[in-house]
Image: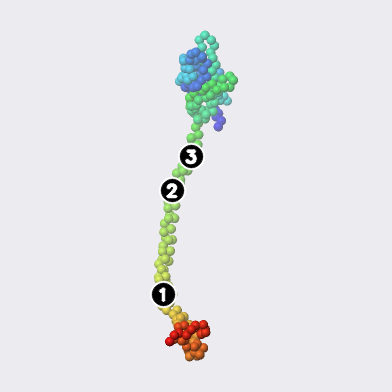
């Protein structure tokens, strides 16, 4: 979202501090400070003596905005007494968020001259002339209040459902034909099985006894007794009379 009409407006920038700065000292703690540059306007924070890698500044500056200029240059140095100050890192602060929303609280990365990570600097920026897009959402709020009046429309159908269900209740009281079926259609078991005895005659009458089917054997008188001679009262009669002497008298 592009922001226009900022020329001449005031932007407040607070330098909170730095974190994880590259250490340029070998024997002692470094003394960092921060420089800000926007167009022809330049600011410098105080030196944080023995601030080391995490100096704290909490200093506020104001810039007059220029139309078309959307970034601030930031440089962090290490202050020296006898020699030139040491360069720690630099970066660019983008103003698009603070100009559109009116507030920005971000930690910005710093880089060395070779493009390596050199730590970060935290800034808090305020812009009082920002136009937040919250007003655009106000007209949509009443649209969400409209659905509540439609609630009674959904409650009306339940009243019609109970009226439609009673007719099935009147159709179910017809269990009266069901008890009639077992009494008339199906006779009791004893009467149902009684005709079966008449349909099938008893086994004795259906099948005659074996003695009647087979004739009795001929009487013993039919066989001639002459074939079997009368046995002698003496033992043994012997079939061979010439081999055994007659018994003594």
Which residue does the numbered mark 2 point to in the structure image?
A: 149
Which residue does the numbered mark 3 point to in the structure image?
A: 139
Q: Name the colour scheme.
A: rainbow
Residue lying farthest top? Answer: 82
- Residue at disc 3, secondary structure: loop
> How far from the left and from the top, in percent, is residue 91?
55, 22
Q: Nearer the viewer, mark 2 or mark 1?
A: 1
Residue appearing at x 52%, y 9% in the figure? 82
Answer with mark 1 or mark 3, whichever residue precedes in sequence: 3
Taking 226 as reference, is 137 above or below it?
above
Which residue does the numbered mark 1 point to in the structure image?
A: 189
Q: Quadrant of residue 163?
A: bottom left
Q: CA distance from mark 1 to mark 3?
A: 84 Å
Q: CA distance from mark 2 to mark 3?
A: 19 Å
Residue appearing at x 51%, y 12% in the figure? 80
> How far from the left and from the top, in percent, is residue 144?
46, 43
Taking 203 as reference, is 66 above or below it?
above
Q: Residues within 10 Å of mark 1 (few under 14, many from 20)?
A: few
Task: Report if the CB atoms under discs 2 and 1 are less than 8 Å apart.
Answer: no
Q: Which quarter of the image is occupied by the N terminus?
A: top right
> How far from the left and from the top, in percent, is residue 213?
49, 85
- Residue at disc 1, secondary structure: helix
Residue appearing at x 56%, y 25% in the figure? 70
- In this view of the protein, can residue 129 be seen by the observer? no
Taking 180 as reference, is 59 above or below it?
above
Q: Nearer the viewer, mark 1 or mark 3?
A: 1
Q: Quadrant of residue 114?
A: top right
Residue appearing at x 43%, y 47% in the figure? 148
Q: What mark, if any, has residue 212 been given in the picture?
A: none
Q: Nearer the viewer, residue 19 or 205?
A: 205
Q: Which quarter of the image is occupied by the C terminus?
A: bottom left
Q: Nearer the viewer, residue 77 or 166?
A: 77
């Amino acid at each position: 979202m592009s922001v226009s009409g900022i020329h001449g407006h005031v932007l407040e920038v607070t330098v909170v501090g730095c974190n994880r700065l590259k250490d340029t000292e070998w024997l002692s703690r470094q003394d960092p400070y921060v420089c800000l540059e926007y167009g022809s306007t330049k600011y410098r924070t105080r030196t944080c003596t023995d601030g080391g890698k995490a100096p704290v500044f909490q200093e506020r500056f104001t810039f007059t905005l220029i139309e078309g200029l959307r970034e601030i240059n930031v440089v962090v140095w290490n202050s020296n007494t006898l020699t030139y100050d040491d360069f720690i890192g630099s970066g660019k602060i983008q103003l698009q968020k603070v100009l559109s929303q009116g507030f920005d609280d971000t930690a910005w990365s710093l880089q060395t001259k070779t493009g390596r990570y050199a730590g970060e600097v935290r800034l808090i920026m305020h812009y009082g002339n920002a136009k937040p897009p919250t007003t655009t959402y106000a007209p949509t709020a009443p649209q969400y209040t409209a659905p509540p009046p439609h609630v009674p429309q959904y409650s009306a159908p339940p009243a019609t459902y109970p009226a439609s269900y009673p007719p099935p209740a009147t159709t179910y009281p017809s269990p009266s034909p069901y008890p009639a079926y077992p009494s008339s259609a199906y006779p009791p078991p004893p009467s149902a099985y009684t005709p079966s005895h008449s349909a099938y005659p008893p086994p004795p009458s259906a099948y005659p006894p074996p003695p009647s089917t087979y004739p009795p054997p001929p009487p013993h008188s039919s066989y001639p007794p002459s074939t079997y001679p009368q046995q002698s009262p003496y033992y043994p009669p012997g079939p061979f009379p010439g081999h055994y002497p007659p018994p003594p008298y």
